Amino acid sequence: MQALKYARAASVDDAIRLLRDGGEAARVLAGGTDLIVQARERRREVHLLVDIKRLAETMVLAYHAPTPPDAPPGFYIYPGLEVGAAVPLYRVYGDPDVQRHYRALVEASHVIGGTAIQGRATLGGNLANASPAADSIPAMMALGGVARVVGAGGTREIPVAEFCTGPGRSALQPTEFIVSLYFPPPASRSGSAWERFIPRNEMDIAVVNAAAYLAFEGDTVSEARLALGAVAPTPLALPDVAAALVGRPLDDAAIDRASAAASAAARPISDMRGTEAQRRRLVGVLVGRVLRKAAARARGEEVPA
Amino acid sequence: MTTTESAPSTEYRVIGTNPVRPDGVDKVTGRAVYGADVRLPGMLYGKVLRSPHAHALVKRVDASKALALPGVHAVLTNADFPEPLEPVMQTVRGPQPTRWDTERILAGRKVLFRGHPVAAVCATDPHVAEDAAALIEVEYEVLQAVATLDDALAPDAPILHDDGLASLVDGLFDPVDGKPSNIARQFTLGFGDLEAGFAQADIVLERQYETAMYHQGYIEPHNATAVWNRDGKVTIWTSTQGAFGIRQNVARVLNLPLGDLRVIPAEIGGGFGAKNVVYLEPIAALLSRKTGRPVQLTMNRTEVLEATGPTSGTRSWIKVGATKEGKLLAADVRLEFEAGAYPGSPVAGGARCALGPYVVPNQRVVGLDVVLNRPKTAAYRAPGAPAGEFPVESILDELAEQLDIDPMELRLRNCTALGMPRSDGAVQGNIGAREVMQAVISHPHYRSETVGADIGRGVAMGFWQNGGGESSAYAMVHADGRVTLVTGSVDIGGQRAALAMQFAEAMGIAYEDINSLVGDTDTIGFTGNTGGSRTTFATGWAVYQAAMDVREQLEQRAARIWECAADEVAYDPSDAALHGPDGKVMTFKEAARRLPGTGGMIQGQADIVSTNVGKVGACFGAHIADVHVDRETGKVTVLRYTAVQDVGKAIHPAYVEGQIQGGAVQGIGMALNEEYVYDSNGRMLNASFLDYRMPVANDLPMIDTVLVEVPNPGHPYGVRGVGEVPIIPPLGAIANAIHDAIGVRVTSLPASPRVILELLDEQAGGA
Amino acid sequence: MAKIAYTLHVNGEDHEVYAEPNLTLLEVVRDELRLTGAKEGCGTGDCGACTMHLDGENVTSCLVLGVEAQGRDVLTIEGLAQDGKLHPLQQAFIDHGALQCGFCIPGMILSGVALLERNPHPTREEIRQGIAGNLCRCTGYTKIVDAIEAVATGVAH
């Protein structure tokens, strides 16, 4: 491994200062499951690692239900899920609120590496690493996730769907890092699902992954989000394909149209993990599967991962 | 669940039971010392600089910057190797120029595969060594890579071995059409009249198959630690399947007298055939000579995958003719095996085994050993046999389908037997091929129906001739009746237990009274590698003979005590006692206690060559696989799996099952998702455990085993080697199951999802 | 590179470490503490041979810096046996013939222990899932699953 220094940030401001002083080759260390491999294999120049694992802001994991209509006047808690950028995955998928409201997130975080990886890896790190094949990013996109980012220039929010700008590249500026991820509360009759295709049942990088969020009013889709992984230089949101689902029932024809449209929208390459044709085909298959699963969950059915 | 198909035996007390292994506690507590756990005072750490090119001339190596780095002690290149005393060396795959072996270990004029070592450096810590290696400047003249078999066999292919050394060995790289080629060797096995055989056939099938290049995938990377003393004596600790083989190889490339080189086999983290080859050992030794300090090198996973010895990628062509009753009349087989950068693929093993389970009166098996710019292949469990037998097991399935005969019944109709000839001219001994096939046919798994859409079942056979060779053992009897048993066989799969059990059986003493150890090259007689399924058989023989030696010495000692003739005393293992005239009895324990006062302690010993003492028992297995195929994604899931095998006599049934289960899963990996992926420049694209897809725990069902016991009359306890065979049948069994499930024939392994989807597309297009 | 000093709490004991900050927890434990039970099989978190527990959670120690673990509880295979008695899972691995070469076993056992602590009565499928991050090349996993199941169901061999 390359020579490097290590610093544990005492506060968010301390982390910003360390990153600023450390220059280009200073990196934020959360779970380290990507970064330490990159440093070891010298794929990414790292001279300073700034550990953000012991900050209250990066270790938060809290869900607040929308304020009930009968709440006393003045009572208001910002609803939704806040996941600190350094919270390990096993805590995310093990959380009862996440399990109840954000099934796509549970499904994605449950299969990133084995249990020993899940003891370290984080959603924030998965997003910051900005791999086109990252497992959790499409799930976060489908759930309307927003990254809360701080840096020398202040605080800002970046929708997960706009976060990745290329393979390994993101909208983060130098000195900026993700503090936490925010997910809005799901609509009352909604469901989400995530699936990936890998040749084995564990360990592999996704050949393709897909996530869907669907909300219903009666039989009609009222809200939809779809996202794909490993089929473009960045994880890919499919707002147009999702929009076409809204305002009508989710019947087989609608699912088939969405699958076909998603296949067409994907821009996969051929590499040793899969060919372009294989990936296009898998996009169609997985989009169909996540839509059906999300819809079933919206109906209140128990659908195993 | 395991079933054993033999009459319950009362003749053995220890054999057939499942005692715990002597290395068990050390291994579950982390105390076992593997090669990379060795730490010596003042030790330096080495790092190998490897070629980024698959084929290039090395024009210049400049290590001055590396040597200037603080903490760096020495740099090594091929020029540091002595000129070999023997220009030609013998290998298990035939003679070859010795110079090629030093150039394989550290490249000379040329690099022949990506990852080929070019230089090595040692420093005070591994990170400094890594930094230093990056500072060594190498100038290459990149040559066109010979990346595939087609590239290698093309008439205008670049020639890998153009240094003229091939002419040292007869029959190596003979010109093809008067031109140099990349075909290292070609040979033909067989007998009978092919033309006549095919002429009589009611049905003739002809197919082509391919298998990918696979890695053994042991979890422990290669390592070596060496000390070159100032008196010229060298000691090497390494993870190997055979200390004596390593000693031989290192001595040969360093021109060392065998007696000056001690090789100590550390606990080994898996080998499967590949840890019989030297990579780091000579480098560590020469770096130690240069620095006067111990030097250790370990590989990382990328180095293991790119630059050790995987198995051959293969291409095969087969034609079979049969009667409409399914009787095989003729078979013509051609096997083309990639050797990697230097000659020596296991194509001969594949050719010997391809038709092994069957009687084929007219047959020809042609084998080609072809070099190309990939790492030199090494042995991998039943070397050559999985790729050699897959085509046969596939085409027989098709034959059975076309003739509407049950696939195992078809095999039974052609089953080989005692006295039948094998392709290589050898004759089958007392074997259990028929018993294995019959056990499949009557097994509940085979008799059950497959239920559900896109679910299918396949069966296939496997055959391995097994190995014998040299083994040594000695047994020291202690005054308290305990015994220390030392053999030269490195323990990978539980040999320490299996050998102690045979000794205990021969003596009639308790397994727990034996301390079973592995010696090193200075403390035990010559013993072949733990490989080829030879150890429990051949070293078991040595152990048995050592027990006989102990018994004889005890008889002499008792005769002295009882003042009678030695032939009046007999040792009886059934009560572990010496019996003399007039009903005199002395237990083993009592005899041991009296040793110090009656002439001193004794030790029994034996050095055997198994061909002199008994016959290697060939081994047969058959697997039944049920799979589900997801037509949408192409993913194959193994639902149920049963491995049936003739094991001769299972010394330790649980460890025999473990061998079968492990081998079967490696074969399932070959069938489904493992493969080397190369680009056209000879660069491996998946050199990590992330992308070299070995089966993980939740990919697999329970591997059920059936131990059929047809004792090998060539061994005192009927042992047959069991480790090799189980890797062979999965390739055919899974491919055949896929056909049964979705109607497509997989002819190129692995049957990865991409391949299945393409076959389904073809099927849809053709329908 | 400048070395730094820190304290590691491993298997219930404090160890003063003075080492480069780029050393992984695996390297520190193996080379500085000389506890060589954890193995490096890949260095990329893919094989699980280096598995340790960090504050009770399963981690691949090749992907953790030694310095990251300061002030936290590290459990390695050497710390699993208590009072000279093997952990039931260690004993079960021996009794069930669940190990061959043994190289993956320290990591495999720690993943098994982590699984049983979180889910004391897993199904065979859950066991397979729980150890899917630990590669074993010798056994085909069947007897490893048997051993973990035996402890989970309290069936002594």
Image (cartoon, coloured by chain):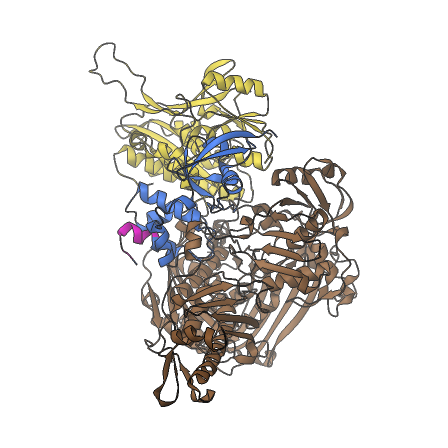
Does residue B659 lie above or below A17 as drawn?
A: below
Q: Where's residue B196, x and y in %?
A: 59, 81
Type of secondary structure dominating the magenta stretch: helix
- Closer-to-camera residue (B196/B696): B696
- The residues colored magenta run C148-156
- Closer-to-camera residue (B575/B238): B575
Q: Is residue B417 left or right of residue A297?
A: right
Inspect this view and state whether residue B154 appears.
Answer: no
Q: Is residue B248 left or right of residue B469?
A: right
Q: What residue sits 26% from the left and 18% below the top?
A: A67
User: Residue B582's image quarter?
Assistant: bottom left
Q: Where's residue B316, x and y in %?
A: 59, 64
Q: What residue sits 73% from the left and 69% below the top?
A: B171
Q: Assess whether residue A62 is covered by the magenta stretch.
A: no
- Closer-to-camera residue (A153/A275): A153
The blue-coloured chain is labelled C
Q: Where's residue A102, x and y in %?
A: 33, 30
The yellow-coloured chain is labelled A
The brown-coloured chain is labelled B
Q: Where's residue B347, x and y in %?
A: 61, 66
Q: What residue sits 50% from the left and 36% below the top?
A: A231
